[in-house]
C-alpha cells in the first residue's frame, strides 16, 4: 500500500516566496545552460520545478509537501488538482524530480542532452505553474 505524502499548512501569501524562489532558480538554470554548465542547469531545473510546485499548492490549497522524499511533490500535486492540465503537469514534475539523484549525486557527468531535456521540461512546468497561480501571488 502506498503511503499518503506528508503535507503541512502554509499561509497562502507565502506562495510569493516560493514563486520568487522558482524564478531565481530558473534564471540560474538558463544562464548555466547558456554557459555549458550542464550539472548547474540540471540542479537548478529540479529546484525551480519543486519551488514552482510549492507556489501552486500554497496559492491554491494553502499546503505544501513536507516529507523528505522529493517525489512527494508530484504526488501531492496529483492528489490535490484533478484537472487534466494539472495531471499532465504532475507527470512532468515526476519526470523532473526523478532526475534529482542523477544530476546531484551520480558520479557520472550530466550530459548536454540531459540538461537540455530537463530545462525544457522545467520551462514547460513553470509556464503551467504561472498560469495556475493567481496574479496576487506572483
Image (tube, rainbow, N blue to C red):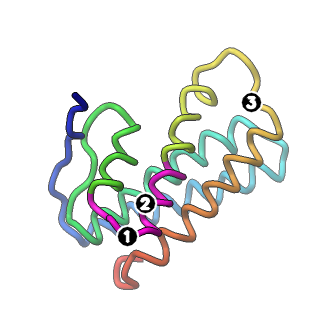
- Report if the CB atoms under discs 1 and 2 are less than 8 Å apart: yes
Q: Which mark is residue 114?
A: none
Q: Earlier in the sequence, mark 3 or mark 1?
A: 1
Per the image, the residue denoted by label 2 is: 87
Q: Secondary structure at mark 1?
A: loop
Other residues around mark 2 within 10 Å, as few (<14) / some (14–19) / many (≥20) = some
Per the image, the residue denoted by label 1 is: 83
- Magenta-drawn segment: 80-93
Q: Residue at x 61, y 55 (%)?
A: 122
Q: Earlier in the sequence, mark 2 or mark 3?
A: 2
Q: Which mark is residue 110?
A: 3
User: What x and y, as percent, mark residue 21?
Assistant: 46, 58
Question: Residues under labels 2 and 3: Cα distance?
Answer: 28 Å
In the depicted structure, whether residue 129 falls above or below residue 88: below
User: What x and y, as percent, mark residue 104?
Assistant: 59, 28
Q: Residue at x 74, y 42 (%)?
A: 115
- Examine the residues drawn in magenta and state their main secondary structure: helix
Does the magenta-highlighted stretch encompass residue 129?
no
Question: Residues under labels 3 and 1: Cα distance?
Answer: 34 Å
**Horizontal placement of 24 versus 62: left or right?**
right
Other residues around mark 3 within 10 Å, as few (<14) / some (14–19) / many (≥20) = some
Q: Residue furthest top?
A: 107
Residue nearest the observer in this picture, 10 or 95: 95
Q: Residue at x 72, y 56 (%)?
A: 30
Amino acid at each position: 500500500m502506498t503511503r499518503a505524502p506528508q503535507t503541512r499548512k502554509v499561509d497562502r501569501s507565502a506562495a510569493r516566496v516560493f514563486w520568487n524562489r522558482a524564478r531565481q532558480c530558473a534564471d540560474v538554470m538558463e544562464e548555466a545552460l547558456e554557459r555549458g554548465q550542464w550539472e548547474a542547469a540540471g540542479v537548478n531545473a529540479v529546484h525551480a520545478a519543486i519551488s514552482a510546485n510549492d507556489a501552486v499548492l500554497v496559492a491554491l490549497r494553502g499546503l505544501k509537501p513536507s516529507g523528505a522524499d522529493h517525489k512527494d511533490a508530484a504526488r501531492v500535486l496529483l492528489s490535490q488538482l484533478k484537472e487534466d492540465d494539472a495531471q499532465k503537469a504532475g507527470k512532468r514534475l515526476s519526470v523532473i524530480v526523478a532526475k534529482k539523484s542523477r544530476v546531484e549525486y551520480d558520479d557520472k557527468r550530466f550530459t548536454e542532452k540531459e540538461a537540455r531535456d530537463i530545462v525544457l521540461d522545467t520551462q514547460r512546468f513553470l509556464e503551467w505553474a504561472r498560469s495556475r497561480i493567481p496574479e496576487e501571488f506572483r
